[in-house]
Image (spheres, rainbow, N blue to C red):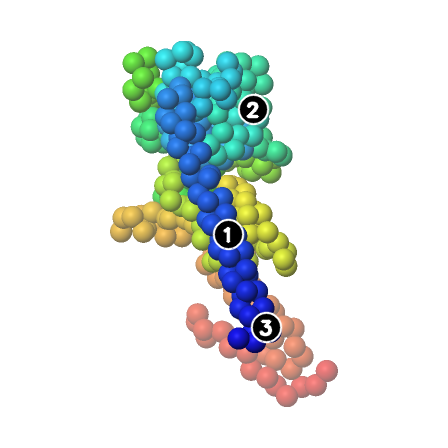
Amino acid sequence: MDVKKLMLLIGALVVAAVTAVMAKNMFSGASAPAAHAIPLMQQQATGPEVLVATRALPVGTIIDAEALHYQRWPESLTQPAYYIKGQTPGGPQDLIGTVVRNEIAAGEPITQGSLIKPGERGFLAAALGPGMRAITVPVSVTSGVAGFIFPGDRVDMVLTQEVGGGDGPPLKASETIIRNIRVLATDQRMSAQGQDGKPEVKNFSTVTLEATPKLAEKIAVAQTIGQLSLSLRSIADNNVDLQKAIASGQVKVPAGADPKAARQLLIDVASQPVDTTPTYTVGAEVSRFQRSTVPTKAAAPGAPGSAQAAGAKAADAVTGAMNQLINTPGVVRVARGNNVTYVPTGAKK
């Protein structure tokens, strides 16, 4: 055999051996993390149950029943400030209605200092978003949705009033003046749970709402115009599609923006109260015996535009024409009984 061919054969065998060794080391290294993952899962399964956030909770979020849940946590990573099941007083039901003081990420354990409970100093101020104000409105059993409105819900505000000023019955109308307002409290209570841990339905007389300074002014004026009613909104109304919102111009995303930032911008826009394009309903749309327009006011006798004023104006015009004819030179007035005629004689002035 040629020496050159023999050397090439030996080189090929060496390269094949080295490749086989490298492949073996590569596959054995990839399987190492899987071998270590089993003890970690066993450690989590044997750790205590810690209260964690099911979703991202920004500052000012009002905790509801779906915001928190228990999850196994490694015992070596457990802190005394966590809410530990069976060890720390309080659970998800006891924390409903509290307000997030510091931002909490999804899956992050809840610490005892990250939430503000009702009655604590700065509680309502922490529940307000940046630039927002709290305003309280009176409600009744019917206008307050029979007590089924709880803190964190979103409502529409409806103003019902009578528009008069003319003859006949006034126009009855209702108008949705503001949409998507967040409820902060009902009768100074932020908790929606009773003493036995079950939801408590209570008829309240006041509701505290979150609004912008301008909307707070509108709500204050609306209370003096007519009766305010609250209409509870569905949670699904705030799940706005990002693509549709961008296409309609509701959300303007800068070019090259992060998709997560765009999603957060959409959430911020969807959570803002809206007072544009109000809708209304008049009495005629409900009953055929009600008015559909504002009643007009009849003109007073002798006032411009009345029938009496029109007749008086016509009489004045006839009298003026007769006086002008009488004073015209060359016209003779001839009376035959009750008939009076004016005959021109052809005389000139």
Q: Secondary structure at mark 2?
A: loop
Spot occupied by residue 164 in the image (x, y as percentages of width and height): 44, 43
Neighbor class of circle 3 (other Cα within 10 Å; few <14, some 14-19, many 20+) is few
Q: CA distance from mark 3 to mark 2?
A: 82 Å
Circle 1 sits on which residue? 21
Is residue 217 something that shows in the picture? Answer: no
Q: Which badge, 3 or 2, comes first in the chain's sequence? A: 3
In the shown orientation, is residue 95 left or right of residue 302? left
Q: Measured along the vertical axis of the image, is residue 198 above or below residue 145?
A: above
Give amino acid for label 3: Val
Question: Looking at the picture, how far across and down is residue 127, in whole percent?
Answer: 53, 26
Residue denoted by label 2 = 101
Three-letter code for the amino acid on which mark 2 is drawn:
Arg
Q: Position of residue 308 (x, y in %)?
A: 47, 57
State the residue in front, 123 or 34. 34
Q: Which residue is mark 3?
A: 3
Farthest-out residue, right: 349
Instruction: Name which residue type carries label 1.
Output: Val
SS at circle 1: helix
Q: Position of residue 113 (x, y in %)?
A: 54, 18
